[in-house]
Amino acid sequence: MKDGAIIVNTARKEVVDESAVFVALEEGKLFGFGTDFVPDRSVSDFRNVIMTPHVSAFTVEGVERAKAKLFDNVFRFLRGGRPQYLVNDVWDLER
């Protein structure tokens, strides 16, 4: 990564090595860090960190889409089908 880069993490907290990010911020290697999760360490000493709550999916439209996918998966399962979006896909191993 080039010096002066900006990291914006809108994914899961585990995607970023948080301790490495803060070391890079302290050393001036990173220009800034944006995140929508709460870091393990205080960000109050950093003027170049922007933090928002992890609520980007909680719009009316986002909740409606999530509910539709949930019900679709329940009906798939009840009809003997394979649910979509499996995280730990052991579906075929258990059948």
Image (tube, rainbow, N blue to C red):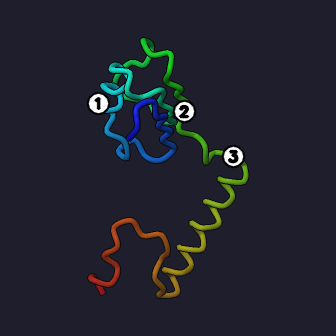
Residue 6 drawn at (x, y percent): 49, 34
In the rendering, which numbered label is found on residue 28?
none
Residue 63 percent coordinates (x, y): 65, 53
Name the kind of residue labelled 1 in the image: Ser
* 72 to the left or right of 40: right
Q: Residues within 10 Å of mark 3 (few under 14, many from 20)?
A: few
Among the two numbered marks 2 and 3 on one chain, the one whose residue lies closer to the N terminus: 2
Total number of numbered discs in the rendering: 3
Quadrant for the N terminus in the image: top left
Q: Residue at x 27, y 82 (%)?
A: 94
Q: Which residue is mark 2?
A: 53
Image quadrant in which the C terminus is located: bottom left
Q: Nearer the viewer, residue 25 or 19?
A: 25
CB under 8 Å between discs 2 and 3: no
- Camera-side residue: 15 or 30? 30
Q: Type of residue at label 2?
A: Pro
Query: Which residue position is annotated with label 3?
Result: 59
